[in-house]
Image (tube, coloured by chain):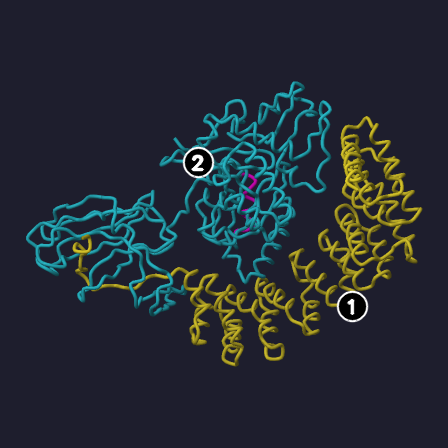
Amino acid sequence: MSQSYAPLLAETPDRARQLSDAQFAQRLYHLENVSTEVLRAALCYGQRAVRRSAAESLAQRADSEAIAALSDVLSRCTPAARAAAARQLSALDWEDAQMLWSAALADSDAQVRMAAIHALFEVDAPEALDLLAEQFNAVRSPRLRAAILEHWAERGGVMHLDLVRAALDDPSPQVCHAAATAMLDLLAESALAPLAQAAQRRQGEAKAAILRGIFNATNYLGIQIAESADCDAILDALADALHDSEPEVRRAATWLAVWIRHPRAEALFEAAYRAERDPEVQAYMLYVAVNLSALCAATLLAEALASAEPPLRDQARFLAQRNDAHHQSC
Amino acid sequence: MGYTLALALGKASCALAYRERGAQPQLLHLPALSAPDGSIPTALYVAADGDLRVGQAALLADAERRRCFQRIPEAICAQPEPAPRQLDGAAWDVRTVGRAFISALLSALPFPLSQIERLLVSMPHFESAHVATRYARWLHESLTALALPEARLHIMSELDAAALRGGVWSAQAPAIFAQAEPEPNVFSVTFAQMAPAARLNARLDQALRQGVPFASLMTERCTPQTFAAALEDCFAYAADQALYPTDLTFIYLGEASAASPLFRATERSWGAHAALETGICALAEGMLQSPPYLLNSYGLRYRTPEGDFAYLELAPSGTPFPRALRTVRLAAAYDDQPMLECVIGMLDPQAKGQITLSAAGGALACTLEPSEIGAIALNEFAPPLCIPVPQPVRAAEPCVEAAFRLDAQRQLRVTAADLRTGRLLLEDAIVTTLH
């Protein structure tokens, strides 16, 4: 019934409908036979989703026309378009894309260079590790610097060891942690002496990060510090760190001290525990000792149950109840 | 009467807002619990007689803080989990405290829980899926313990709530979300994507089964001095996603005086800013707001000279509201047609047809000329609003000028006039509600 009241348009019908950027980007991704020129225009002038979709399509095409279009974008388009193009370079053949990599990594815009660095992570060619080394010191993001260090560690980039070692003095604790784990990944026990020196040299969060890095990496790599020739160097660093003025450093040092199965490490830990004045940190130390089954854990736990400090006593009761429950279930 | 209740749950404080069906959102002030700014400290006091007090009442009850638990949501995420506190021979672990806090808070509402049709709880974006799940599980345990049906419990990301409140929400837009932490001069900076339009909030039980959806690419704490480094980290993640800083939205939650140095530091880079000065209360209000633009495209159905139906686009997807839409001249399809119907269709974005691109002015515009009808009529059988046509009228003779507009409640309205006499036929009549 309602159909009989439909109007006519008194003007020339305009049937065009606007597509949002997201709608167009989705279509662009799935359409076949889109000309390179259209993709280039979409990459240069489109919004974020369109740019990304166009850049992906061009890179997947990877023929000479597509490479020329990407090269043109990298040399003439907006920084946003250049960043989208740079991020897709890893889809191209390494040899074919040499000029494009050079352009992207030398771009005047830091965001374009960062996009190219992320693309380099996806390249298998050993030269990619060298290109990352060239960029490393100019990278302003601590997380990205840490990611480069982790990438070298995964790919065995020993030729860039000088940069890894220098990163132990980076202002960012996150980079220091990545440098410590990368050193152990690349050099195994041989990294312990320089890491001990770095831990002695650095202060505050950076020191704590290096100690955590040593603990984490020796743990997952199965490195027995107690059997290493440089065990004393690490223990010297720990002797200081366990009495550091920063609670964060003392907490980080606790993990490593309890993890190293060595009589001096145990003595250092127990002395530090008894000297600890902050009951919150002391409760944390007890938690670590019990969880890592330190030899002195049972004694410390028994003492802590009678402690006058509520945080320590509560922690002790919690750990004791958990131990009891565990024994009963066994 | 049914309520939608929003609980914005921050580390140090929370806030409640509610909306009655068909009404505007309102902040909920609970006299004994709320601070003067409307926020409620996330604190629980356990009295020796077992009495529980929350919010301001908890802080006032225990000067020594030995029987008072503070920053409860933060403790839920802490690693290692804090040891339980022993009170009167009972162990109060973080989850027990959290459950008791939620229970005491919701029992202080001025309406019974049975009247809550929908409860939205905010969740931070977590970098760790494990911590996110632990947090969601605690919420689920706490809320279902109150006999609230699972179908009524939803979670929503803090980022989306803040973006909605700040008027900068956009589906799946990448954003940097900076919040003032409880400690002075400390901020948390999160880089994450806003939710897709259809998933602005998620059912809590489904999120637990399928994975909590609000993952951040990065969350870190910083000071004003280290904010630049945190920003560089955000840009690095943006670069990984092939994004440029101008693609990003920057939202700040906290005191405006602290925001200005952060905004200045980011001045060159951002697509949109929003600063929410009222902190956690703004989040609670934002949780009850709708997206500030239409999520779909809509058009007016008309008959072609060939006798087929077609649609004239009135409001494309992304149209903000309120907004004046197009004015259309209409004609009768046959002699003496008594009225013209306003059937509105939701246009199919997947419709087949020819796409035209234009890059005029440096921005790309894309239009689709559909080769099929590509629309679903929304109000065809409602019945549709009809514009009376003064008689006599001849087929194809232009007779009505219809001006469409979208009001602040997303209602499509039309004002129609007789083209021949100028007489008003309909004034601001509601056609239908668009989404």
Q: Position of residue A89 (x, y in %)?
A: 58, 71
Identify residue for label 1: A158
Q: Is residue B158 left or right of residue A257?
A: left
Q: Position of residue B314 (x, y in %)?
A: 28, 55
**Residue at point 46% right, 35% down?**
B5
A156 or B359: nearer the viewer: A156
Circle 2: residue type: Glu
Q: Is residue A193 left or right of residue B36?
A: right
Q: Is residue B422 left or right of residue B351?
A: left
Identify residue for label 2: B117
Q: Colour of chain A?
A: yellow
Name the secondary structure under disc 1: helix
Name the secondary structure under disc 2: strand
**Residue at point 65% right, 66% down?**
A121
Q: Colour of chain B?
A: cyan
Circle 1: residue type: Val
Q: Are marks 2 and 1 on the same chain?
A: no
The reply to whether callout 2 and callout 1 are in contact (CB within 8 Å) is: no
**Residue at point 37% right, 61% down?**
B349
Q: Is residue A325 above or below residue A199?
A: above
The residue most toward the bottom is A64
Q: Quadrant of the N terminus of chain B?
A: top left
Chain designation of label 1:
A
Q: Quadrant of residue A248?
A: top right
Give the Cα distance between marks 2 and 1: 61 Å
Start-end of magenta stretch: B257-267
Q: Quadrant of residue A160?
A: bottom right
Q: Quadrant of residue A4?
A: bottom left
Q: Position of residue A48 (x, y in %)?
A: 48, 61
Q: Is residue B263 a member of the stretch shown in magenta?
A: yes
Q: Is residue A244 above or below residue B192?
A: above
